[in-house]
Image: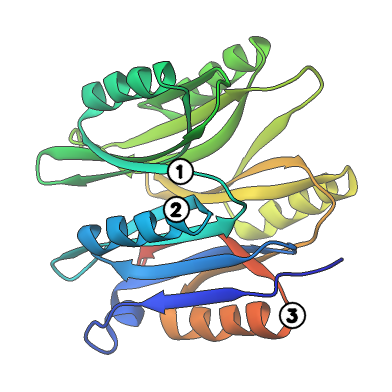
Amino acid sequence: MKVSKMAILLFTLLPSGWLAAQNTFSGLFKQSNEEYQYVFQYNWEDFVARQLEMDSLGYSLVDVETGTEGKYRLFWGIWKKDGGHTILKRLEGWEELVQTKRMMAADGFVMDDIEAYREGSKEYYVAVWAPGTTPHKVRQLTSWEGLTNDYDELVLQGLQIVDLEGFQAEDGKTHYLALYHQMAPGERTHMYRSPDMESFLVDKSYRNKSGYRLFDLERFEKRGTDFITGLYRKEDNIDVILDQLPWEEFNRQMKELIGEKGLVLVDIDIYPAGE
């Protein structure tokens, strides 16, 4: 399989050692014949500027992640060169997100990615839209049981989960954001959750044998237990996981996977050290 010819990593400058001391990183890497670019630890203004630049060059924003370094709120992004067009928005509060989603759908845009975080008493939602008319829904659930029940109902309606996020809401609890797209009959995505990586990888190996590959990897905390959750769809390319590494080690292995093995980073996640 032909692999990517270009994978560019861009960084902002922060005090040495912050990343390793405060956060751990997980990433999902895959084979691809498309070009990717990445930015890590940008402030919001610089991130928006980079998105506009990448959009003008035909790169679609496919993954947004946010985290804190000391007192700074920073953003990570992954772009894929496909000639597409994406729009990035940050909304304050769930009501504004829902209203904006309706307006964007009316203008012919589909939500493709979503991220959420809280600062003080305010909740922010960062969403990416791409041109399209695909019926889609975004849901916020306050419990895992509620999420799985909602998932079962929406699957019966022909909607498939394409993105899953967890964040600590104003009530202090983990809330779950799930994005669903309507797909053709027979097209399916699947969700699986495990309390440890060992059992997660066992399940993943069986799904791989059935032709399903991981396309989204998340960790959520519930009642003191750290859960690993994966979303799967039919694909034939290989995938590699780097899980919860300090930045120096993640960066070293990432450069090896991208530069020497020709893989691309398609999903990145950041967790406070110790989670």
Residue at mark 1 to residue at mark 3: CA–CA distance: 29 Å
Please indicate, yes or no, whether residue 242 appears anywhere in the rendered image. Answer: yes
Mark 2, other Cα within 10 Å: few <14 / some 14–19 / many ≥20: many
Whether label 1 touches label 2, CB < 8 Å: yes
Residue highlighted by disc 1 = 86
Residue highlighted by disc 2 = 55
Mark 3, other Cα within 10 Å: few <14 / some 14–19 / many ≥20: few
SS label for mark 2: helix
Q: Residue at x 81, y 57 (%)?
A: 237
Name the residue at the bottom extreme: 16
The quarter of the displayed image where residue 161 is located? top right
Residue at mark 1 to residue at mark 2: CA–CA distance: 7 Å
Q: Residue at x 56, y 46 (%)?
A: 84
Q: Amino acid at mark 1?
A: Thr
**124 or 143, nearer to the observer:** 124
Lower sequence index among marks 1 and 2: 2
Say which mark, if any, is on residue 261: 3
Say which mark, if any, is on residue 240: none
Whether 263 is drawn above or below 164: the answer is below
Whether 102 is drawn above or below 196: the answer is above
Please indicate, yes or no, whether residue 268 appears anywhere in the rendered image. Answer: no
Q: Nearer the viewer, mark 2 or mark 3?
A: 2
Q: Amino acid at mark 2?
A: Asp
